[in-house]
Image (cartoon, helix red, strand yellow):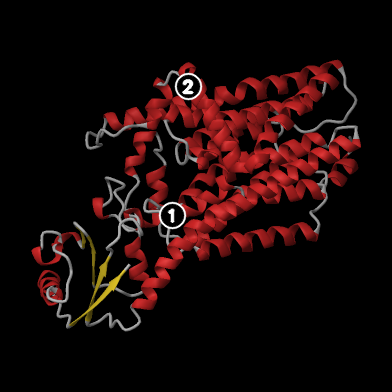
Amino acid sequence: MNKTGSKSEHRKPQIGGWLIGASLLALIFTLSLIQGYWRHDAWIYTDSEAHEIIDGKWLADPLHAILHDLPPSLSILLAFLIVSLFLTAEISRIYRGRHWTSSMATICALSLFSPSFLSQLHWPTHALAGSLPLLLSMCWIEKSSLLWRLWRAFLISFGSLSILSSFAFFAPLCLLPERDTSPSTSARSKLIWLDVWSVAFASPMILGASLLLTKLIRDSVIANHASFPELPSRLDLAFTTNYTELVPGLIAISTSFLLRQWGWLGLSIPIVVALISVWSVATHSKWGACISCATVWILLIPIFASAGSGTSWQRVALAWCCIPTLAALAITDLRKASLRRGLLVLLMAASACSALIGMYNFSISALSTRDLRNKVTRQTKALNPMSDLLIIDVRSIDSLSPKYIWGGWPPFAKSNHQNVRFHRVLDELHIHHYVIHQRELIFPPDLSDSTCIRHAITDHNRQKILDCYNQRKQVELKNVLHINL
């Protein structure tokens, strides 16, 4: 292809694409603002992530030191931007710079709001740190040779396993070759078959090598630091699990993941992938075979990882958000227009269903945390933070789960068993003098041995609680405001 033709293929995105992208970023930022507070182990609440070395995430703690003070809304916005840029850049590279069809763009945009990706909103800084290997890999996206693609896949796999493993499963996407429409020659045919074999076999090998390397680094660090507690490790389970005994579990997890990701339309995703695979074999489409192999691995590896580590978290299947777009990319080469349109409509419907499920799942958590925050705000309007003590009495454990207030992780946090996210809410409301009472759970922890607080709070012992607090904290508060959650 001549230089002029090459330039014509890499045309600048139309202004509509930029507007859609800006709208999506505005939406994800708005969603983050709706959240009242984050999960109890979100980085913004923790003092250290040194315990993550147990699972081989040796880069988590250094990145935590750098990123944990970033505003959560900014963190998730940057993470969403990086993943969006990575996916669009990869698909554009594979598609040889051609303009995306409107159906492909719609499918990709909807897929970014899938349950697996929106679940990252609970851990915004985690998501930003985990997306950094994707950003780094884009430095070599213009280099299309097989060796560079292998390097980029390894960088994402090893880097993500060292930070947040969910992002490692994007690695097979880097191995896909560019779509080549030039006349086939014997030499070119051999090169394309090399691409097929690299996607088919290099994907699991790179992930396996990355897993082994992270384990070696983990063992080396622990061997030189005797202070690490003996905690159960999902990394060790990945090496010791007998996967042949997990077949029933794999089927259950895969079905569960498909339904959680795309609803009942999720059962059609493996069928579409199978049709693409059959079409690739029937038409000798090596490029279609590459996409089929990559899609199969992106589908299967998170399932094996989840089963092997003994978890069934939907966020493990984060990379599934690119599967409908990859399938749509392969479908564009189908000659039968009616079949092509039908499959694109099916993929679009599945992506729309996925976005609705993701938004619904997020709304449950966002509303519960936001409602609790608003309830505290309403009930503390009369509070004078300079002279009043706030007593928060959580009487019903059933109506308000302890995990919304208490957090028992990580063991390396300075506050240890009192590592809480709800305290951040009170701090943001400028409430600094308070006692949280929930049966036998008392905060602040240095008041937990106080008999006057350990008993049920009544009108008779509020003054005792105030006196006890003043004595322990060496303050002179005068009044008590008692609220119930």
Instruction: Classify 10 Å Cα crowding around label 2: few (below 14), some (14-19), many (20 and above).
Output: some
Pick whichever, 155 or 14, lies toward us: 14
In the image, what residue occupies the spot 25% across and 82% down?
Answer: 386
In the rendered image, which quarter contains the N terminus? top right
Identify the secondary structure beneath mark 1: helix
Pick whichever, 474 or 132, lies toward us: 474
* Sooner in the amino-acid sequence: mark 1 or mark 2: 1
Q: Is residue 71 visible?
A: no
The answer to whether residue 205 is above or below residue 54 is above
Question: Residue tagged by mark 2?
Answer: 246
Left or right: 50 as drawn, with respect to 32: left
Q: Position of residue 50 (x, y in %)?
A: 32, 43
Give, as a three-letter code, the residue at label 2: Leu
Instruction: Classify 10 Å Cα crowding around label 1: few (below 14), some (14-19), many (20 and above).
Output: some
In the image, what residue occupies the spot 36% across and 72% down?
Answer: 376
Question: Residue tagged by mark 1?
Answer: 67
Q: Position of residue 431 (x, y in %)?
A: 30, 74
Front position among marks 1 and 2: 2
Q: Quadrant of residue 51?
A: top left
Pick whichever, 15 or 470, lies toward us: 470
Q: Position of residue 475 (x, y in %)?
A: 15, 77
Give, as a three-letter code, the residue at label 1: Leu
Identify the secondary structure beneath mark 2: helix
In the image, what residue occupies the spot 12% across and 73% down?
Answer: 461
Q: Is residue 134 visible?
A: yes
